[in-house]
Image: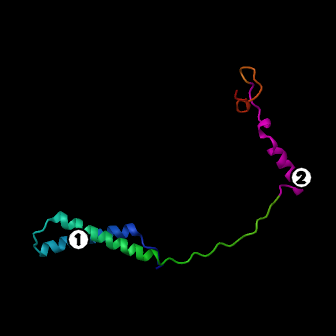
């Protein structure tokens, strides 16, 4: 059987179930006149405090994460283009992309798109 990480939620509900079963068994044998709700709340607070302490103690014992391995970046140009030709094409495409879009003509006769109009 492979060891696995502890599931905190399942452990918490299992312990709560065991605590309720133990509480029932003790109440069948021992007859104490105590406010039941007060003792239940106190027991739950103690249980959650103990779980919090166990979680805090366990969090300090984590294994070291191995450092990532650095890989060399390789730049590939598409097809059989030279790097200079590829750079020229990219530069031309990024030069003014707004001029490459077919915009519908403006309704009031303006030839400039809305974003390029001057504010007066």
49 left or right of 82? left
71 left or right of 43? right
Please tell me whether residue 18 belongs to the stretch shown in magenta.
no
52 left or right of 120? left
Q: Give the answer, above or below, for where 119 lies relative to 108.
A: below
Magenta residues span 77-105
Q: Which residue is mark 2?
A: 85
SS of the residue at dot 1?
helix
Asked which quadrant contains residue 37, the reply is bottom left
Q: Residue at x 89, y 55 (%)?
A: 84
Residue 46: give its label: none
Residue 21: give its label: 1
Q: Give the answer, above or below, for where 99 lies relative to 20.
A: above
For label 2, the crowd category at 10 Å Cα-Cα, with few meaning under 14, some 14 to 19 and many 20 or more, is: few
Asked which quadrant contains residue 7, the reply is bottom left
Give the percent coordinates (x, y) of residue 25. 18, 73
Give the percent coordinates (x, y) of residue 50. 32, 73
Please tell me whether residue 102 belongs to the stretch shown in magenta.
yes
Q: Nearer the viewer, residue 79 or 75?
A: 75
SS of the residue at dot 2?
helix
Asked which quadrant contains residue 11, the reply is bottom left
* Residue 89 in view (yes/no): yes
The mark nearer the N terminus, 1 or 2, is 1
For label 1, the crowd category at 10 Å Cα-Cα, with few meaning under 14, some 14 to 19 and many 20 or more, is: few
* Residue 80 in view (yes/no): no
Q: Residue at x 56, y 77 (%)?
A: 64
Q: Nearer the viewer, residue 11 or 3?
A: 11
74 left or right of 27? right
């Amino acid at each position: 059987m492979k060891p696995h990480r502890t599931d905190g939620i399942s452990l918490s509900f299992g312990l709560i179930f065991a605590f309720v079963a133990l509480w029932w068994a003790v109440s069948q044998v021992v007859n104490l006149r105590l406010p039941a709700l007060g003792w239940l709340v106190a027991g739950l607070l103690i249980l959650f405090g103990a779980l919090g302490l166990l979680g805090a103690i366990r969090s300090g014992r984590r294994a070291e994460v191995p450092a990532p391995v650095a890989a060399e970046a390789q730049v590939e140009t598409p097809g059989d283009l030279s790097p200079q030709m590829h750079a020229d094409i990219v530069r031309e495409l990024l030069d003014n992309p707004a001029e490459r879009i077919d915009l519908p003509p403006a309704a009031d006769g303006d030839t400039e798109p809305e974003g390029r109009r001057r504010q007066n």
